[in-house]
Amino acid sequence: MHTLWKGSISFGLVNVPIKMHAATETKNFQFNYLHEDCHNRVRYIKKCPNCDVEVKGENLVKGYEYEKDHYVILEQDELASLEKATSRSIDILDFIDLKEIDPIYYQKSYYLSPEETAQKAYRLLCQAMADTGKVAIARLTMRSKQHLACLRVLNENIMVLETMHYPDEIRNMEVNWDHVTPTETELAMARQLIENLATTFEPENYRDELREQMKELIEKKIAGESYKVTAPSEPGKVIDLMEALRASIALTEQKDSIEEQIETIEEKIETKEDSTNNKDIKDELEGQSRQDPEEKSKKRKKAKGA
């Protein structure tokens, strides 16, 4: 795994040399802008409108606009001097409970792996944090920015660093709900709907359907084939909240019923050793589900008469 950054975890007098790796990756398709007439890629140039010349990289400097069209120039050595000698250190500040951190603070995830000489200290820190159920709040400097971070243990033996927003980077959104009060019936039905949809989190159940369609579109275009996009169905307008809740609950209960029937079929098949009997059971159950209601009624009457 590619190393993005090297440093050390520092807590108390303990120093654990580590390497940082990206824990996530973006799967988005990257597009280039082409000239429509010739399909050649367009080139972006840095041009000074005052001098009317293209500016090369070595002639660029960083400036901060403190008022309209007025800049203060910051030299590279001045910026570098702001990074302290501890810039290669992940300094642990506090240990807290993970549930105390609202997810809105998280930015990006990184894996931390130990240098060969620090494996025991790394394992010690992982195990101690797992045993206490604590995560660490830390600070580090990376790419000319000082980050707040959360260190936590994944699967009991991998250290994960989550960069975080500072409190003043979280925007405040004010909402006044004093004029909106759901009824107890509406709340009860909403809770029931949530309970019907509640399940365990299994990441493999979720896919980026738009990316899959984009991939299919690109592959068909490369092969010279046409691709028809199916227009999504328009969502119905919610006229009556109670009716919408009732309909939603009915849909979830219908889904649960179908899943239970499938599970019953699978269980009956699994309990039979003979493959022929397995097929007969499945055909019988599928036949029952397709059987006409009048036919079922006749069979019941015939059974009672016997």
Image (tube, rainbow, N blue to C red):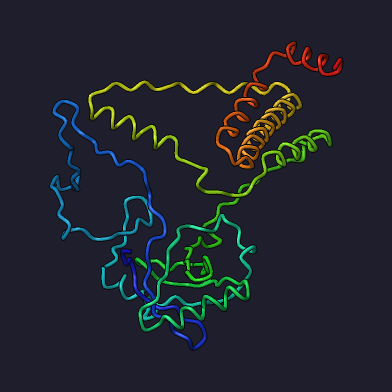
Q: Quadrant of residue 2?
A: bottom left
In screen coordinates, is 241 left or right of 76? right
Residue 253 point in image, percent of width and height: 71, 32
Location of residue 106 with respect to 302 vertically, above or below? below
Q: Quadrant of residue 199?
A: top right
Q: Nearer the viewer, residue 25 or 283?
A: 283
Q: Quadrant of residue 194?
A: top right
In screen coordinates, is 5 left or right of 277? left
Q: Nearer the viewer, residue 168 or 64?
A: 168
Residue at the spot 67% in from the left edge and 39% down from the top edge: 197
Location of residue 97 with respect to 16 vertically, above or below? above
Residue at the spot 56% in from the left edge and 54% down from the top edge: 104
Residue 293 point in image, percent of width and height: 73, 14
Location of residue 179 with respect to 66 vertically, above or below? above
In screen coordinates, is 3 left or right of 273? left
Location of residue 279 with respect to 234 vertically, above or below? below
Q: Nearer the viewer, residue 51 or 109?
A: 109
Furthest-right residue in view? 305
Residue at the spot 34% in from the left edge and 35% down from the top edge: 215
Q: Nearer the viewer, residue 234 or 54?
A: 234
